[in-house]
C-alpha cells in the first residue's frame, strides 16, 4: 500500500470542508489514453487505491500500463472505541488522498478501448467517490 516515507507532522487536520470546488491541477490526461476522473470531492484511502489498482491489473492480465495519479499523503487519526472525550487527538490509523471534483485518479494505456473501459469501470466500483471514464478523443 502507498504511504509517505516521512511526514513533517505526525498528525494533521482533516480539513473536510476545503475540498469544495473543481480541481485546477491534475485534471487532464497526461500519461495514458484512457482515464478515471472523480466527479465529486472526497477522501480515498491507500487501501482503496491499492484495491482499484489490483482490480485493473487482474482484469487486463497485467497487460498495458497503469498510472496512479493520486498519492495518500494525509494521515487520518482515530480514537479507540468507547473512549471518553478529552485525552487529546487519536493515534494515526491510515493515510488517505484528498480529492477534488475533476481530479484524474488513474490512467491506462496500451489496451483496446473496450478492454480499458471495462478495467476502469471495475476499478471505479472500489472507490468511495463517483467517477467517470474519460479518453483523449473526448477531451
Image: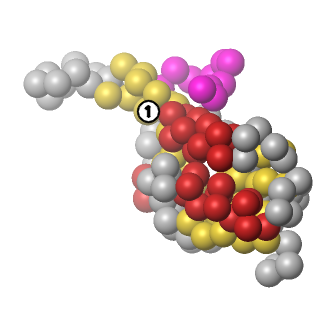
Quarter assignment of residue 88: top left
Main SS category, magenta section: loop
- The foreground one among 99 and 52 is 52
Q: Quadrant of the N terminus?
A: top right
| Residue drawn at x 76%, y 38% as measured from the top left | 62
Residue shown at 88% from the left, 53% from the top? 110
At 77% from the left edge and 54% from the top edge, which residue is drawn? 107
Q: In this view, does 92 lie above or below 113?
A: above
Query: Is 114 placed above or below 78 here?
Result: below
Q: Where is residue 81 in the image (x, y as percent from the top left)?
A: 17, 24
**Does the magenta segment cover residue 136?**
no
Residue at image coords 52%, 20%: 10
Spot occupied by residue 100 in the image (x, y as percentages of width and height): 58, 61
Location of mark 1 (residue): 76
Circle 1 crowding by C-alpha within 10 Å: few under 14, some 14–19, many from 20: some
Query: Can residue 74 be seen in this snapshot?
Result: no
The magenta region covers: 1-11
Amino acid at each position: 500500500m502507498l504511504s509517505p516515507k516521512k511526514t513533517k507532522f505526525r498528525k494533521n487536520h482533516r480539513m473536510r470542508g476545503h475540498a469544495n470546488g473543481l480541481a485546477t491541477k491534475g485534471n487532464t490526461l497526461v500519461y495514458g489514453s484512457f482515464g478515471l476522473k472523480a466527479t465529486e470531492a472526497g477522501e480515498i484511502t491507500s487501501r482503496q487505491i491499492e484495491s482499484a489498482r489490483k482490480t485493473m491489473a487482474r482484469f487486463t492480465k497485467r497487460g498495458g500500463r497503469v498510472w496512479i495519479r493520486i498519492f495518500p499523503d494525509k494521515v487520518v487519526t482515530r480514537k479507540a472505541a468507547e473512549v471518553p472525550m478529552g485525552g487529546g487527538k487519536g493515534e494515526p490509523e491510515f493515510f488517505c488522498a484528498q480529492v477534488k471534483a475533476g481530479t484524474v485518479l488513474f490512467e491506462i494505456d496500451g489496451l483496446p478501448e473496450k478492454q480499458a473501459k471495462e478495467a476502469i469501470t471495475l476499478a471505479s466500483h472500489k472507490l468511495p467517490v463517483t467517477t467517470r471514464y474519460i479518453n483523449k478523443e473526448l477531451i
